[in-house]
Amino acid sequence: MLDKLKRLFIIEDPNAQTPKVEEPMDTSMSNQSTSSTQKPTFIPNPTIEGTPDSKFIDILLGALDKNNLEGYDYLEYKQALQSLSKVGMDEVTKYKSAIAMAGTMGADKAQILKTAEHYLGILQQEETKFSQALNANKQKLAQSESSGLTNLEQGIANKQKQVENLLAEIEKDKIKLSELKGTIEESSLKISQTAANFHAAYQLVTGQINEDLNKIKEYVN
């Protein structure tokens, strides 16, 4: 059933690739001689545009599959619409004809609309679960930033007051600070990209259902 749902909802180019997160700057020992004289450069977070990630699409459609209602409902209606699209029928006639076909299976417009709302509710539950997991990751990142950056920055400030024989140790801590900031920035960007990809997939699926709902309400008396 999941494969059928994919054929119903997935219309994007299957060859499209999800933008990759840029790898952090190499801070290995081979670069230690130059890092001591260069301040780390941090690029502001770019504007992230999500793409419908196949992993999230599978999760969303899998949820629809697990909660598929008995009998003829919106999903079967969606399949009928897809079949009618292949015969060159205009949109109004297509939507009306699909309702007529539903009638032969014991379903009517009200049933199709009701079940479509049911599936939107299932997708909303998936978005809620995703948001909860995302917020948990953000809290972990915030804790890491608070403890790691604060401790290292305070350590650097204290050691700068010490005698000259501690300068070598201070430079090592600066390198650690740069690495930690780079790691935190990379993690934050990955979380943002993951969120954007999920919501793009969510909009792809719910957008089609909402579009069908609006057209059913507009075209079918």
Image (cartoon, rainbow, N blue to C red):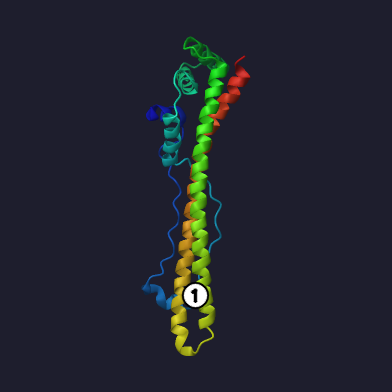
Identified at 46% across, 67% down, the residue is 180
User: Vertical placement of 63 versus 31: above or below?
Assistant: above
Asked whether 159 or 21 is in front, the reply is 159
Residue 103 % position (x, y): 51, 11
Quickly name the residue at label 1: 38
Asked whether 85 or 190 is in front, the reply is 190
User: Vertical placement of 198 versus 141: above or below?
Assistant: above
Residue 202 % position (x, y): 51, 38
Q: Is residue 39 visible?
A: no
Q: Residues within 10 Å of mark 1 (few under 14, many from 20)?
A: few
Quarter of the figure with residue 5? top left
User: Vertical placement of 99 versus 150: above or below?
Assistant: above
Residue type highlighted by circle 1: Gln
Identified at 56% across, 52% down, the residue is 47
Identified at 51% across, 40% down, the residue is 127
Q: Determine the secondary structure under disc 1.
A: loop
Asked whether 43 or 57 is in front, the reply is 57
Q: Quadrant of the N terminus?
A: top left
Residue 98 % position (x, y): 51, 15
Q: Is residue 34 visible?
A: yes
Residue 92 % position (x, y): 58, 17
